[in-house]
C-alpha cells in the first residue's frame, strides 16, 4: 500500500506540468470575465469537444427526470421520510437572510419553483453554462457571507470545510493559470428552489468549477445529491492557504481496498486494465468526463452493476467500503450521515465495487461503488489546465448519486404532505 509520504509526493508534483501561458488559449482566458469566457464555448465553439458535449447535455435535459438506475427500471419504496435531526430552523433563518437582501432582479433569477428543471442544469467545467441565481464574486460581501452561512448551517462542519477547501483550490488554480476572473474562491452560483420553510419542501443549488452541490430539505431531513467535487491540483503548495488538500482520503482508501483483494477478486473487480482502454465501447470515455459516468446532466443514466460483490468481501474489506462511503457522505450532518451509511450497509448484498486501471502505488485509477441507494465514483484525470497528457494523481474528480430517483429529493417528494389547503371560498 502506498505510504502517506509517497501519496504526498504524487499529489504535489503538479508543478512539472504548469502550462505555457503565452498560448492563445491562456491569453484569452486571462482577459475574459466569466461571460466572455462562456462565449468562447457557446458562440465560438471552443473547445469543440466540450461544445459537442454541452449540446448533448442540453438534449439530456429535455428528457423527463427518472433517475439513475442499474437496468432502466426505477425501484420503488427505497426511501422514507424520517427525522434526521437537521437544524431546519437555523437553516431557514440563514436562507431568509439571503432572500431579504436580494434585489427584485436578483430574486427573479434566484428564487425558482421547487419543480424547476433548473435543478438539473448544474455543471462542473469553469464555463458559466447555466447563468441562474447569483454569482458570489459579483454580489455584496454581506450577501456573499449569507450564502456561505447557509452552506455552513446545512452541511456538517467537516463537509463545509471540504467545500471551502475546494473553492480555495479553485482560486489557487486561477492564480496558477492567470485566470482569476473565471476561477476564484467565489466563482460559484447559488439558486433557491421553493420557499425556505421549516415544514415544507425546498432546496438550493451551489455550483461552479469543481464544486456542485444539490441540496433538498424537508423538515429535519436533508438530501445532498447529486454532488460533484474535483480538484486540479488537489493540494495548495504556496500562499495563505498552503497545505489545503482534498480527495486524498478517497484516493488512499480506494487503493487500499483494491490492493487488499485476492487475485481472483482483483480480476473480477477490474472492468478495464487501461485508463483509456481499446476494449471500451464508444462513449465509455470522453474528453470531459473521461471515465466517470454520472456527472452533469446524467440524471437518467443506466449504469449496470460491474465488478465484485461487496457481500463477498471479508469483514475488514467491507469496513474499508464503509470508510470510503463515509468520505462520500461527509457533506451530510452527523445524524443524517449515520443513517445514510446504515442505508448503504443494509444493501451490501446488492452493492458492487469495480475498478479501471492498474493498482500499483503509482498507477492512476478509477473506481465505483454502486447499490440501489448510492453510487459514488472516483477518477484520476489528465490535465485540463495543467499539461499532463495522461491521468495523474493530482487531478481528481469525485461524485455521488442517489439512484432510483433519490437525486434532488425526488423520491421523497411524493411522500411529502401538501402544505397549501386545496379548499378555497372567496368571501369578498
Image (cartoon, rainbow, N blue to C red):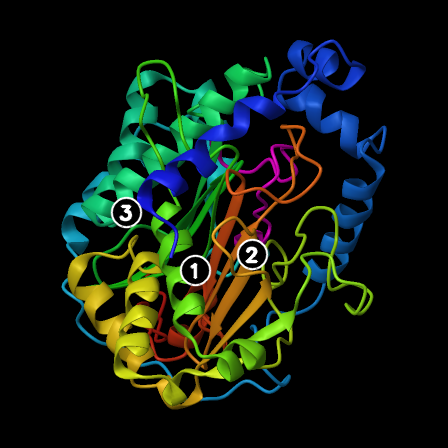
Q: Is residue 212 magenta?
A: no
Q: Which residues are magenta?
A: 118-134
- In front: mark 2 or mark 3? 2
User: In this image, 341 relative to 236: left or right?
Assistant: left
**Above or below, 20 relative to 46:** above
In the image, residue 332 sits, relative to residue 39, either above or below, namely below
Residue at the (56%, 59%) spot, across then down: 366
Q: Which residue is mark 3?
A: 159
Residues under labels 3 and 1: Cα distance?
A: 22 Å
| Residue 163 picture quarter | top left
At a point 46% along the width and 22% down the height, the residue shown is: 171
Q: Label 3's element?
A: helix
Which residue matches tag 1? 255
Q: Real-space Cα distance between discs 1 and 2?
A: 8 Å
Callout 2: SS: strand
Going 39% across and 68% down the picture, which residue do you hit? Answer: 257
Closer-to-camera residue (392/329): 392
Q: Quadrant of residue 98?
A: top left
Residue 305 badge = none
Amino acid at each position: 500500500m502506498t505510504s502517506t509520504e509517497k501519496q504526498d509526493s504524487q499529489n504535489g508534483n503538479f508543478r512539472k506540468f504548469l502550462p505555457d501561458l503565452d498560448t492563445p488559449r491562456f491569453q484569452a482566458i486571462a482577459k475574459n470575465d466569466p461571460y466572455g469566457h462562456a462565449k468562447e464555448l457557446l458562440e465560438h465553439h471552443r473547445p469543440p469537444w466540450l461544445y459537442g458535449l454541452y449540446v448533448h447535455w442540453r438534449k439530456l435535459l429535455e428528457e423527463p427526470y427518472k433517475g439513475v438506475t442499474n437496468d432502466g427500471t426505477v425501484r420503488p419504496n427505497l426511501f422514507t421520510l424520517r427525522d434526521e435531526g437537521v437544524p431546519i430552523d437555523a437553516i431557514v433563518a440563514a436562507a431568509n437572510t439571503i432572500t431579504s437582501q436580494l434585489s427584485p432582479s436578483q430574486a427573479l433569477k434566484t428564487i425558482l419553483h421547487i419543480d424547476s428543471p433548473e435543478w438539473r442544469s448544474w455543471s462542473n467545467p469553469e464555463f458559466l453554462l447555466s447563468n441562474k441565481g447569483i454569482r458570489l464574486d459579483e454580489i455584496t460581501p454581506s450577501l456573499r457571507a449569507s450564502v456561505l452561512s447557509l452552506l455552513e448551517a446545512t452541511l456538517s462542519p467537516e463537509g463545509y470545510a471540504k467545500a471551502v477547501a475546494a473553492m480555495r483550490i479553485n482560486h489557487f488554480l486561477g492564480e496558477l493559470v492567470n485566470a482569476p476572473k473565471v476561477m476564484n474562491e467565489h466563482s460559484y452560483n447559488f439558486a433557491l428552489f421553493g420557499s425556505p420553510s421549516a415544514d415544507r419542501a425546498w432546496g438550493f443549488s451551489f455550483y461552479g468549477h469543481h464544486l456542485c452541490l444539490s441540496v433538498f430539505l424537508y423538515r429535519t431531513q436533508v438530501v445532498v445529491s447529486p454532488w460533484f467535487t474535483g480538484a486540479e491540483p488537489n493540494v495548495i503548495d504556496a500562499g495563505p492557504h498552503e497545505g489545503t488538500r482534498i480527495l486524498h482520503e478517497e484516493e488512499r482508501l480506494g487503493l487500499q481496498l483494491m490492493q487488499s483483494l485476492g487475485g481472483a477478486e482483483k480480476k473480477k473487480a477490474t472492468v478495464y486494465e487501461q485508463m483509456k482502454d481499446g476494449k471500451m465501447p464508444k462513449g465509455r470515455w470522453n474528453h470531459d468526463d473521461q471515465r466517470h459516468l454520472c456527472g452533469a446532466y446524467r440524471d437518467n443514466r443506466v449504469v449496470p452493476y460491474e465488478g465484485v460483490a461487496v457481500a463477498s468481501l471479508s469483514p475488514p474489506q467491507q469496513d474499508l467500503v464503509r470508510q470510503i462511503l463515509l468520505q462520500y457522505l461527509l457533506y451530510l450532518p452527523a445524524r443524517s450521515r449515520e443513517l445514510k451509511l446504515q442505508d448503504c450497509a443494509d444493501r451490501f448484498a446488492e452493492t458492487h465495487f469495480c475498478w479501471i486501471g492498474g493498482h500499483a502505488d503509482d498507477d492512476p485509477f478509477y473506481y465505483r461503488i454502486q447499490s440501489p441507494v448510492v453510487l459514488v465514483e472516483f477518477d484520476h484525470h489528465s490535465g485540463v489546465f495543467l499539461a499532463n497528457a495522461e491521468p495523474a494523481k493530482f487531478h481528481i474528480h469525485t461524485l455521488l448519486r442517489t439512484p432510483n430517483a433519490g437525486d434532488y429529493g425526488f423520491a421523497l417528494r411524493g411522500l411529502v404532505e401538501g402544505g397549501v389547503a386545496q379548499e378555497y371560498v372567496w368571501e369578498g
